[in-house]
């Protein structure tokens, strides 16, 4: 268990290893804490880029939110420090990398595998919502995989404390956006339930339910125009349809997701 006091934090503490990936604002490296040999990921962000991107406030919020989260399916945030040019984030190393890459390689996931992931996501989201944190950017790209194949929700750059009608100039895909966010209306935790339904669909089908050209995607979302292929089991289809509801209040609550027959059937741990 790594315990880093912010005083003692500086780059010298770490042996920098291979690059793990590159995000919009930062490169991420494998790092080893010299004293303990503890492996972690070091996200390096350049202050100049943060200022140009006008994302300083968002980064501070991401750091503030993630610092207080402790859950097996949420990527752990250990600390941060900065020098004159860069901000460094020390985060848990997800040894099996991106779920997105696994999904693209496999095409789609088996129902047992998808059910296990959805159960873990429901557990992470339930923890977050109890703290009135909404993630708002659930998608395969933001889910990493730990050394035992467990999933780790990451990327809290868009998370906020609910409720909010924060205007998000989202530049990523529209595929996961619920109708209320597309309409830039006030929204709450239930936006994550919609995205969980989109995620489940994409795990089982290999493509998102409203995937199309951007304008078509937008109109298909607000009209709830999607179809579930016949190879998807009736139980799985039932859960998808209970999450993809235009009215946020009608989306299946997380505790009922965990007890849904499709989840129970595939997940040993009934706890
Ligand atoms: N903790 C980690 N463990 C293992 N790999 C990681 C970790 N964090 C990031 N990576 C790798 O680095 C890539 C970029 O990291 P990350 O997604 O956090 O950047 P980002 O700023 O969120 O980029 P974007 O906003 O475009 O998603 C990830 O896609 C992943 O491949
Ligand atoms: O020079 C600074 O004081 C500075 C600090 C931080 C910062 C400090 C703690 C947490 C965090 F997420 C970010 N971010 C920056 C981004 C751009 C330019 C300067 C800074
Ligand atoms: Mg990311």
Image (tube, rainbow, N blue to C red):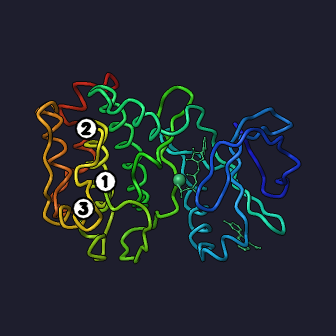
Q: Say whether disc 1 or disc 3 marks the residue closer to the N-terminus.
A: 1
- The image shows residue 50 at horizontal and vertical percentages of 66, 71
Rendered residue at 39%/37% (across/down): 120
Residue 1: quadrant of the picture: top right
Q: What element carries label 1?
A: helix
Q: How far apart are marks 1 and 3 (CA)?
A: 14 Å
**Residue lying farthest front?**
213
**Residue lying farthest top?**
268
**Residue pointed to by mark 3:** 217
**Residue pointed to by mark 1:** 195
Q: Which residue is more in the foreground, 159 or 225?
A: 225
Residue 32: quadrant of the picture: top right
**Residue pointed to by mark 2:** 205
Q: Say whether disc 1 or disc 2 marks the residue closer to the N-terminus.
A: 1
Q: How crowded is mark 3: few (under 14 residues within 10 Å), some or many (20 or more)?
A: many
Q: How crowded is mark 2: few (under 14 residues within 10 Å), some or many (20 or more)?
A: some
Q: Check the image and report above or below for 103 versus 143.
A: above
Q: Mark 3 near mark 2, Cβ–Cβ under 8 Å?
A: no
Q: Which residue is more in the foreground, 189 or 205?
A: 205
Q: Which residue is more in the foreground, 225 or 152?
A: 225
Q: Is residue 189 left or right of residue 217?
A: right
**Residue lying farthest right?**
12
């Amino acid at each position: 268990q790594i315990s880093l006091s912010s005083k003692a934090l500086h780059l010298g503490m770490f042996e920098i290893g291979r690059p793990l990936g590159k995000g919009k604002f930062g490169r991420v490296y494998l790092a080893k804490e010299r004293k303990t040999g503890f492996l972690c990921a070091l996200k390096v962000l350049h202050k100049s880029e943060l200022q140009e991107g006008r994302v300083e406030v968002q980064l501070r919020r991401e750091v503030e939110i993630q610092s207080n989260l402790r859950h097996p399916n949420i990527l752990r945030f250990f600390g941060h420090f900065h020098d004159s040019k860069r901000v460094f984030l020390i985060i848990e190393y997800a040894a099996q990398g991106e779920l997105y890459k696994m999904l693209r390689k496999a095409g789609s996931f088996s129902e047992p595998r998808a059910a296990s992931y959805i159960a873990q996501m429901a557990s992470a989201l339930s923890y977050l919502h109890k703290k009135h944190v909404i993630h708002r950017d659930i998608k395969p790209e933001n889910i990493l995989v730990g050394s035992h194949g467990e999933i780790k929700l990451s990327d809290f750059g868009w998370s906020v404390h609910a409720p909010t009608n924060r205007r998000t100039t989202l530049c990523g895909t529209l595929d996961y956006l619920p109708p209320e966010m597309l309409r830039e209306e006030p929204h709450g935790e239930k936006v994550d339930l919609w995205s969980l339904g989109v995620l489940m669909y994409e795990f089982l089908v290999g493509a998102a339910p409203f995937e199309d050209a951007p304008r078509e995607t937008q109109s298909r979302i607000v009209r709830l125009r999607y179809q579930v292929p016949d190879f998807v089991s009736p139980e799985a289809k039932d859960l998808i349809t209970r999450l993809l509801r235009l009215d946020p209040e009608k989306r299946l609550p997380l505790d009922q997701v965990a007890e849904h027959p499709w989840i129970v059937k595939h997940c040993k741990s009934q706890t």
